[in-house]
Amino acid sequence: MRSQIVRIVVVSLMLLASHPSAAGEAQTNSLADETSGASAQGASTPGPQQAASSESRWQLGIALGYGLRTNPLVQSDDIPIIVDIDISWFGDHLFFDNGDLGLTFVDNEYVTTSLVGRINSDRVFFGRTNTKFVSVDLAGQPLSSTFEVSIPDRDYAGELGFELLADGRWGQLQLSAHHDVSGTHNGYDVEFDYGYGWRNQRFYVEPSFGLSFKNEDLNNYYWGVDADETNAALPEYTAGSGVNAFARLQFSYQISRNWSFSFVGEVERLNDEAAGSPIVEEQNIFGYFAGFGYRFR
Amino acid sequence: MRRLVILLLILLPAISNADGEMQLKVRPVLCIIDQRTPHCQMSFLVLWQSVETGYYCLYNDFGQAPLRCWTEQRSGKLSDERTVNREFSYWMAGDDNQSPLAMVVVEVLRMDSNDRRRKRRSRHVWDIL
């Protein structure tokens, strides 16, 4: 029943998106507003309208540097970051953005709303875990004998949801809600993200923060421990719903038309239900990356 | 070594006709605009040097008249206050005023987009591009 509803919604949105007036008119209005506001000392200025029309649908870039993301799981390794590759394509309605697939059905001067399919990112921590033989449990209590402890494996989940983007002089806002459509965790999450950027020519600073609500099904799938995964060292655990919070600070310096240097630092606080799991060691996840980026223009 | 590479990347576009008779340098050669700052209001420092003393004039794309001319000079400089939102050029010409002896292009780079989807955030620390 649920999959039928999802199918109907998807087909309806595709039909809506295929109507040229839905997004096209709004785009034209937006461009016209900007052109009328543009002025410059000097000769004929093409203005943003020409700049916008010449913008490639492709967005390609690569960054090389060094960074790290800590892994909150016990018996796990942090995640090193050496390369960042950006491959995106933005059509009038359809888009591909580094693994996310989207269908834009509203685009006006206030908001852009899309249907988005993506892969859940919580799985990333479970790819770098180790098996250990322990004589104390995860709480530090001695055990009667030695036990093998492995962090239970978790699968990637394919999710489908809606995303709303808005921006202005007040900053950038992103609201999204995604539901599992792959039958992996059968849960959903709702995310809020706000950022504000300052630019002074080549320098750019952007702090941002956000919240992410994860329902019980999602939270328990990734952070819970099922009865068949337990042993004397790894007790059963059921996680309820919770809200993750994160903050991020990005600094970048534009070296030339194509090259930039960037540093970004991020901290994410896992919700208490996830942090209380016996497989979780750290409630805060820290990340940073510094490197040189090249954007194809 | 990395500093040297960065320095070269910055300076190379700013030096025109370095091996020829006329050298023209402009600083800065990159202006960055976005939605909040749709124009660059900058002071461009223009420096020129020639191997021969003579009559030279500095032009740009914003007018047919020269910004300034120098008589019996082999070097000169000018500070040009300007508000721009598109790429333009400075060039030096001699008596004939026909062929540029040296030219430098000032690039204007728009860093944001009218398409909000290009500002989507993926919550990954490595997402810096």
Image: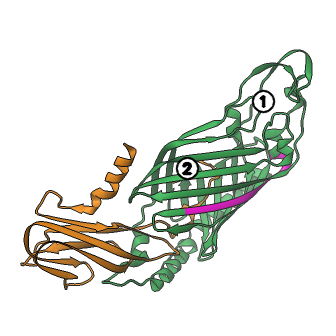
Chain colours: A green, B orange
Residues at discs 1 and 2 in contact (Cβ within 8 Å): no
Indicate the amino acid at tag 2.
Answer: Asn
Relative depth, front residue between A26 and B72? B72
Where residue B104 appears, as percent x and y from the top left, is 24, 67
Q: Which residue is mark 2?
A: A98
The answer to whether tags 1 and 2 share a subunit is yes
Relative depth, front residue between A255 and A227? A255
Indicate the amino acid at tag 1.
Answer: Pro
Give the answer, above or below, for where A105 lies relative to B59. Answer: above
Q: Which residues are magenta?
A: A205-218
Q: Which mark is residue A152?
A: 1
Q: Main secondary structure of the magenta part?
A: strand
Q: Is residue A228 left or right of residue B45?
A: right
Inspect the magenta stretch and tell me whether residue A161 lies in it. Answer: no
Q: Quadrant of residue B71?
A: bottom left
Where residue A207 appears, as percent x and y from the top left, is 64, 61
Mark 1 or mark 2: name the one nearer the start of the chain: 2
**Residue at the image position 72 percent from the left and 50 percent from the top:** A268
Where residue B100 appears, as percent x and y from the top left, is 14, 71
Dot 2 falls on a residue whose secondary structure is: loop
Q: Is residue B2 left or right of residue A230?
A: left
**Residue at the image position 90 percent from the left and 32 percent from the top:** A236
Give the answer, above or below, for where A163 lies relative to B1. Answer: below
**Residue at the image position 46 percent from the left and 68 percent from the top:** A201
Q: Is residue A211 left or right of residue A241?
A: left
Relative depth, front residue between A63 and A239? A63
